[in-house]
């Protein structure tokens, strides 16, 4: 698969809220996930390996009470990289309603995502 094909598939699955399926289908077994520096060491911080990334996703989903809006932009592709903007308006357990917006950058090698990195303001 080309980087553009991987990017379009990721966007399609994420728009449907099927994040775990996207990870299972599109990520390399040794993929890494990088959060902003302030969040890197927390329970949903940086992760190495698909198993750890899936667990991080489960922890996030367990913290969500309700999703009010889930938007994912079309991808911007350059060689083995692509980025998307994501917007999630959700009610989080113990935190109330939260409006989250981030830029997500992905690196593709050998038809699989080998790295994801998220950029957002920590409030």
Image (tube, rainbow, N blue to C red):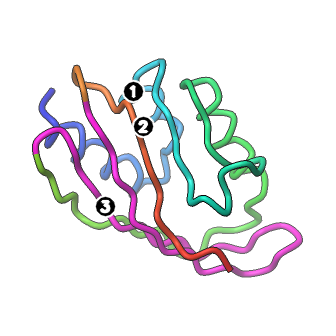
23 displayed left or right of 65: left
Q: Which structural element holds mark 1?
A: helix
Query: Marks 2 and 3, how far apart in space?
Result: 14 Å
Q: In the figure, residue 121 lies in which quadrant?
A: bottom right
**Residue 25: which disc?**
1
Q: Residue at x 70, y 52 (%)?
A: 60
Query: Marks 2 and 1, how far apart in space?
Result: 5 Å
| Residue 90 in magenta stretch | yes
What segment is highlighted magenta in the picture?
Answer: 79-108
Compared with 97, 86 (above or below) is above
Q: Position of residue 71 (x, y in %)?
A: 41, 69
Give the mark, 2 or 3, whose residue is nearer the N terminus: 2
Q: Position of residue 17 (x, y in %)?
A: 49, 53
Q: Residue at x 73, y 48 (%)?
A: 41
Query: Marks 1 and 3, how far apart in space?
Result: 18 Å
Give the mark, 1 or 3, whose residue is nearer the N terminus: 1
Q: Indicate which label's residue lies in the foreground, 2 or 3.
A: 3
Marks 2/3 in contact by CB < 8 Å: the verdict is no
Q: In the figure, residue 97 lies in which quadrant?
A: bottom right
**Residue 90: which disc?**
none
Q: Position of residue 119 (x, y in %)?
A: 46, 64
Marks 2/1 in contact by CB < 8 Å: the verdict is yes
Q: Which residue is mark 3?
A: 84
């Amino acid at each position: 698969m080309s980087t553009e094909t991987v990017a379009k598939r990721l966007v399609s699955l994420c728009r449907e809220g099927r994040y775990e399926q996207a990870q299972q289908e599109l990520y390399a077994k040794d993929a890494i996930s990088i959060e902003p520096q302030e969040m890197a060491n927390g329970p949903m911080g940086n992760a190495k390996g698909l198993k750890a990334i899936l667990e991080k996703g489960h922890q996030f989903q367990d913290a969500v009470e309700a999703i009010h809006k889930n938007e994912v932009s079309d991808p911007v592709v350059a060689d083995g990289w692509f980025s998307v903007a994501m917007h999630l308006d959700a009610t989080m357990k113990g935190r109330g309603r939260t409006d989250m917006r981030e830029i997500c950058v992905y690196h593709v090698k050998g038809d699989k995502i080998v790295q994801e990195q998220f950029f957002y303001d920590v409030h």
